[in-house]
Amino acid sequence: MLKLNKYDKAVPGKSLAGFKINDNIEKFLPLVEHYVINKEWIIDIQNSNRSVTLYEFPNGEDFYIYFKDPEVELYFCSRKLVHILVGKGYEGEIFEGNVRIGSQIREVKQDLILDEAEEVHYLMDVNGKLIDGICFIAGGYEVEEDPEAIITQVKVFKTEMLY
């Protein structure tokens, strides 16, 4: 049975928290405890969530599943998992060097590029190329501007969908 693993290591573009990109929504339904179906978007759905909540978009093909502890957000497009976002309570290693949620941004050894519009950081490889399929949130500033910024969330996503 599918199970959240708060210690699972991030694999860019592939998996995080024990979940795999491209998995079908049906695999996740046994985990869901509360459903919000075909209703207006609830602004505070993440904060008011008390367990595992599924939000179904009116089109019936796109979904969010929110876990309370640890904080995990799964987004499904056309019933396939396309992004996994983790936050508070997630304890798995995100990047090499034991970098985790709660680590300072300066602990990331790879070069970083900041997407100022989205306020997320992307990793660069040794050749200066973007490492596709992973990004993280740590204050929204360049490393030089705020090296002590804390990594609060990490997202692994389908590599064909940079958004």
Image: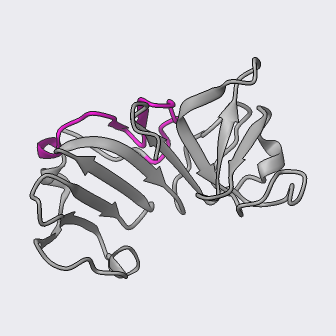
Q: Main secondary structure of the magenta part?
A: loop
Q: Residue at x 74, y 33 (%)?
A: 97
- Horizontal side of 38 relative to 144 (left or right) equals left
Find residue 93 and report its horizontal and vertical position in percent: 60, 39
Q: Residue at x 86, y 60 (%)?
A: 146
Outermost residue toward the front? 117
Please state, as top left, top right, bottom left or bottom right, where the N terminus lies in the image.
top left
Model colouring: one colour
Quadrant location of residue 16? top left
Find residue 141 and report its horizontal and vertical position in percent: 77, 59
> Which is nearer the eye, 1 or 39?
39
| On screen, residue 12 above or below 48 | above
Q: Residue at x 85, y 59 (%)?
A: 148
Q: Which residues are magenta?
A: 6-27
In the rendered image, residue 18 lying in the magenta stretch gets the answer: yes
In the rendered image, residue 119 lying in the magenta stretch gets the answer: no
| On screen, residue 34 above or below 9 | below
Find residue 151 and report its horizontal and vertical position in percent: 68, 56
- Horizontal side of 115 relative to 154 (left or right) equals right
- Horizontal side of 12 relative to 49 (left or right) equals right
Outermost residue toward the top? 127
- Horizontal side of 105 relative to 67 (left or right) equals right
Find residue 102 and report its horizontal and vertical position in percent: 68, 57
> Which is nearer the eye, 156 or 18?
156
Q: How many marks?
A: 0
